[in-house]
Image (cartoon, rainbow, N blue to C red):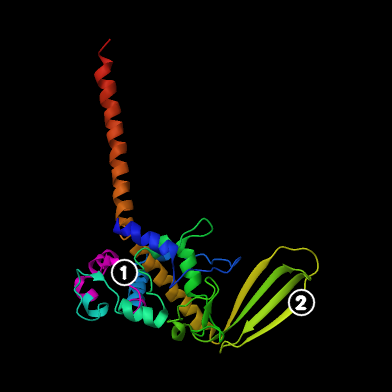
């Protein structure tokens, strides 16, 4: 019941408030291979512990479940747990809810099942998170100085910005107005200062949104994308830590049922063979 309530709460209010997703923004595909790579999952767990747990909790996840991704209790305690928590404790948030309400207007959501909560008919939760965490850009007009292509006017700051590095962002929107179809191009420089230009579009094409980034350091940006993939892999694992075990057990169960069916069929034929 508690897990269900958390899922419902996250569906209703995600990422520090009601999500206003930018219409038409494409969700980048998450690299699924990371989900089976223990090194990636461990890297994601380290990023989660260092950057996410200062504001977000994971009240349905215990530290000792990280044994399922190849970590022992000593490694979990020495490298991931800060403060007085024990390996058997749930992952609680360092920030007090009362302080969060004062600073941000609302307590940040629990991330235990965020990958499932952000899944919709349009895209998977893992694709959304992969796009969201890589979609921050400087916006001097916002209260935090940041905005996000996957969640417009997000209240959450870009806590990983130093790992990503500065970049220029270009958002090009094609839409229908009373004056006809216009292309509006907004360029945000590395400091978040926006420059907007508009131009008419010939024909009657559909509305669209195109986003592109120009990082100051391309190699650093590629490394950051890889780190985000690790973090999302961990968030997916945390949503259902027993998934891999269930699949592994399920394969053996199906093999057993198959062998049992063959043996049962053979016994049935043998029994009825001499009965006329």
Mark closest to the chain's N terminus, 2 or 1: 1
Relative height, residue 252 to residue 242 (above, below): above
Q: Residues within 10 Å of mark 2 (few under 14, many from 20)?
A: few
Q: Quadrant of residue 63?
A: bottom left
Q: Nearer the viewer, residue 173 or 240?
A: 173
Q: Is 227 covered by the magenta stretch?
A: no
Label 2–label 1 contact, CB within 8 A: no
Question: Which residue sits at x=44%, y=68%?
Answer: 14
Q: How many labels were placed on the picture?
A: 2
Q: Residues within 10 Å of mark 1 (few under 14, many from 20)?
A: many
Which residue, given by chain and number where applicable, does mark 1 sit on? 58
- Tell me the quadrant of the picture where the C terminus can be found: top left
Question: Percent position (x, y) of residue 220?
Answer: 49, 83
Question: Which residue sits at x=19%, y=79%?
Answer: 84
Q: Is 74 covered by the magenta stretch?
A: yes
Q: Nearer the viewer, residue 58 or 66?
A: 58
Which residue, given by chain and number where applicable, does mark 2 sit on? 199
| Start-end of magenta stretch | 52-76
Q: Nearer the viewer, residue 1 or 53?
A: 1
- Tell me the quadrant of the picture where the N terminus can be found: bottom left
């Amino acid at each position: 019941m508690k897990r269900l309530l958390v899922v419902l709460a996250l569906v209703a209010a995600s990422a520090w408030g009601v999500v206003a997703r930018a219409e038409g923004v494409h969700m980048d595909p998450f690299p699924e291979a990371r989900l089976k790579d223990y090194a990636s999952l461990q890297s994601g767990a380290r990023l989660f512990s260092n950057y996410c747990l200062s504001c977000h909790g994971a009240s349905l996840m215990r530290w000792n479940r990280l044994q399922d991704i190849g970590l022992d209790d000593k490694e979990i305690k020495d490298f991931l747990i800060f403060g007085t928590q024990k390996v058997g404790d749930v992952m609680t948030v360092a920030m007090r809810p009362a302080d969060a309400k004062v600073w941000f207007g609302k307590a940040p959501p629990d991330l235990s099942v965020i990958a499932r909560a952000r899944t919709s008919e349009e895209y998977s939760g893992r694709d959304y998170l992969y796009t969201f965490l890589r979609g921050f850009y400087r916006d001097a007009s916002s209260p935090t100085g940041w905005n996000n292509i996957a969640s417009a006017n997000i209240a959450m700051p870009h806590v990983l910005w130093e790992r990503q590095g500065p970049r220029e962002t270009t958002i090009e929107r094609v839409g229908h107005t009373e004056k006809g179809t216009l292309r509006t191009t907004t360029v945000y420089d590395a400091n978040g200062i926006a420059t907007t230009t508009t131009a008419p579009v010939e024909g009657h094409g559909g509305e669209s949104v195109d986003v592109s980034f120009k990082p100051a350091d391309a190699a650093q940006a590629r490394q950051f994308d890889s780190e985000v993939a690790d973090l999302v892999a961990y968030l997916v694992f945390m949503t259902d830590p027993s998934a891999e075990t269930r699949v592994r057990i399920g394969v053996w169960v199906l093999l057993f049922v198959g062998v049992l069916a063959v043996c049962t069929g053979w016994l049935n034929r043998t029994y009825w063979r001499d009965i006329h």
